[in-house]
Amino acid sequence: MSQSQRNSGPWVPAIAGGVIGAGLTAATIVLAGPTLFGERMVREALVANPEMLVQAGEALREQQYASTLAPIRASLERPYHSSWKGAEKPEVTLTYFFDYACGYCRQSNPDIERLLKEEKGLRVVYRELPILGPESVAAARVSLAASKAGRFGAYHDALYAAGRPGPDTIALAARTAGVPPQPAADPAQEAELRENMALASQLGATGTPLFVVGNRVINAAVGYDALKQAVKAARKS
């Protein structure tokens, strides 16, 4: 299954190419440039060590994203009230755009919880991106109200435990967290949702989940190992 198939959302891709495109571009750069041993030996090295191509693609993508991320990093890593988990003084911040109705986000949730337990100094900032319909929006608004009340974690965990968002599960999670199931309109919440949409658009998001850590932007449910590797790379940068 391709990366684009492991996210949920109706958005049109803003950045073409992806993993394969970036990798081929990197390989073309390597093979086109002057080398000490010649083009044939470079080709043989890539055939014998295909991971070099993957690494070249990752390096190129990080380089491309660095200029995009630099002016918006503070906004990405600044949580809305209590919409974060992990280290109070983080060494690494992973920003996570998600939708409570997204099956791939639900699939990713245990991976994030495991990272938080195992990666000391990691903070995860949760950014609501309700793109899958009215129930997504309703769940996100209660989540933001819970966040403002300092109860984000309680609501977040309770809703995932309750099941797919709907009137009953949202109400149950809200009661568990001690917040109203139908919060009053709040301009700050609407501003937060608009900002999240704008940030995701700037990153070329095609849906959810969307992870940002260091200079890596991952728009798919890639699993624990890939997320852990991204966190590890961010620590080194």
Image (cartoon, helix red, strand yellow):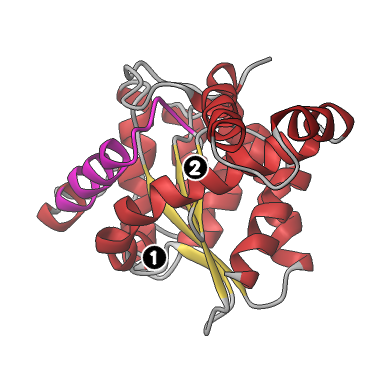
Quarter of the N terminus within the rendering: top right
**Horizontal relation, residue 95 to residue 142: left or right:** right
Mark 1: secondary structure: helix
Tell me which amino acid carries mark 1. Answer: Glu
Q: Are marks 2 and 1 in contact (CB under 8 Å)?
A: no
The alpha-carbon separation of the residues under discs 2 and 1 comes to 20 Å
Q: Neighbour class for label 2 at 10 Å: few (<14), some, many (≥20)?
A: some
Image point (34%, 63%), residue name: 73
Q: Is residue 217 visible?
A: no
- Residue 191, given in percent of the width and then of the height, sits at 15, 51
Seen as rendered, the residue at the extreme left is 187
Mark 2: secondary structure: helix
Disc 2: which residue: 61
Compared to residue 237, the image places residue 177 above or below, namely above
Taking depth in this image into account, of 228 and 47 the one nearest to the observer is: 47
Q: Is residue 32 visible?
A: yes
Image point (58%, 25%), residue name: 24
- Residue 82, given in percent of the width and then of the height, sits at 41, 68
Secondary structure mainly formed by the magenta segment: helix
Seen as rendered, the residue at the extreme right is 48
Image point (57%, 69%), residue name: 237
Seen as rendered, the residue at the extreme bottom is 89
Tell me which amino acid carries mark 2. Answer: Arg
| Residue range corresponding to the magenta coloring | 191-208
Image point (57%, 79%), residue name: 91
Taking depth in this image into account, of 64 and 206 the one nearest to the observer is: 64
Disc 1: which residue: 77
Asked whether 196 falls inside the magenta stretch, the response is yes
